[in-house]
Image (cartoon, rainbow, N blue to C red):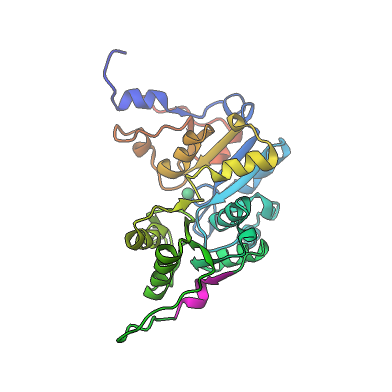
Amino acid sequence: MTSSKTASSLAANVIKLSDPEKELLDQVDVFIFDCDGVIWRGDSLIDGIPETLAKLRAAGKKMFFVTNNSTKSRAGYKKKFDGLGLNDVPAEEIFSSSFAAAAYLEQTKFKDTGKKVYIIGEVGICEELDLIDVPYIGGPADSNKQPDMGSGGMLEVDEDVGAVVVGFDRNVNYYKIQYAQLCINEHDAQFIATNLDAVTHLTDAQEWAGNGSMVGAIKGCTGQEPLVVGKPSPLMIDYLENKYGMDRSRICMVGDRLDTDVLFGTDNGLKSLLVLSGVTSEEKLLSPENSITPDFYADTINDFFAAAPAPKEA
Ligand SMILES: [Mg+2]
């Protein structure tokens, strides 16, 4: 083995899960699952998932389900889980980035400032802020507004806005961008992003511009970088550690994306496992261009309870 770093040397470091009991289940108390590409694809549950989750629960494993999609609240996602037959998943196990934004505001005692939030985003963020009793404006209520851009026209903003939360918004418009710009540039409001995902999967026919595009608009007019609360920010792990006293080294992040899910795991001192049931192919994982290495990979999480097929000859 004297060759330089090649695909085969990387491939040698990426282990396909073959003895799940010993390699994984004995080493891990908490699983953090990305949802799309791991639990479901779009609106269809991946085969075998309810049985696998039930086995993990029976084995005493704690589980959390994480999504960077901020358009739904925890309660909204709970309905999606129920609709797919995953009724055993309580809302407390669901971490949407809408919830992460609210958790951040709660941790930093935003409510005590007496200020309100301006939202670029959908109902998920509004519902989460309602739950922590933080007042907000914007969001869906501003979807059809236009600023007065005639001679001498201006947009008056509420001076009590202390933070702008930017999440995925299918009705983003110039009014919302100008409102956020004024709050941040003229009133020193904090700039918080639920996530920076470049693309998202609104439909399965193509990729769609993700929240990175909404955040990019606000970066462009403020010159500021946002505080990011969703993956791959460490905020959620800090939250789990504080709330449940969890040991990072016994947490495993499971996802289908290298640059968000696996990176989130490796950056935060967690174990990481890539599943091939979503957007990343085995070829991409093992390619020389990829430098992000999970501890293990598997076809689906169902492999946690079955011996994976023998690896193909190298
Ligand atoms: Mg995914």
- Position above or below: 25 against 75: above
In the image, is 274 to the left or to the right of 107? left
Q: Position of residue 25 (x, y in %)?
A: 62, 30
Quadrant where the N terminus sits is: top left
In the image, is 311 to the left or to the right of 103? left
Q: Is residue 63 visible?
A: yes
- Position above or below: 7 against 219: above
Report the residue that reaches farthest toward the top.
2
Q: Position of residue 272 (x, y in %)?
A: 51, 34
Quadrant where the C terminus sits is: top left
Q: Residue at x 60, y 39 (%)?
A: 31
Q: Which of 205/246 is in front?
A: 246
Q: Residue at x 59, y 41 (%)?
A: 238
- Position above or below: 75 against 279: below
Q: Residue at x 67, y 64 (%)?
A: 133
Question: Is 75 colored magenta in this rendering?
Answer: no
Q: Position of residue 185 (x, y in %)?
A: 40, 63
Question: Is 137 colored magenta in this rendering?
Answer: yes
Q: Which of 188/24 is in front?
A: 188
Q: Position of residue 101 (x, y in %)?
A: 55, 56
In the image, is 221 to the left or to the right of 111? left
Q: Residue at x 51, y 50 (%)?
A: 230
Q: Is residue 298 visible?
A: no
Q: Count the marks.
A: 0
Q: Magenta segment, which residues?
A: 136-144
Q: Residue 53 lies in what quarter of the image?
A: top right
Q: Which of 104/279 is in front?
A: 104
Report the residue that reaches farthest toward the left.
4
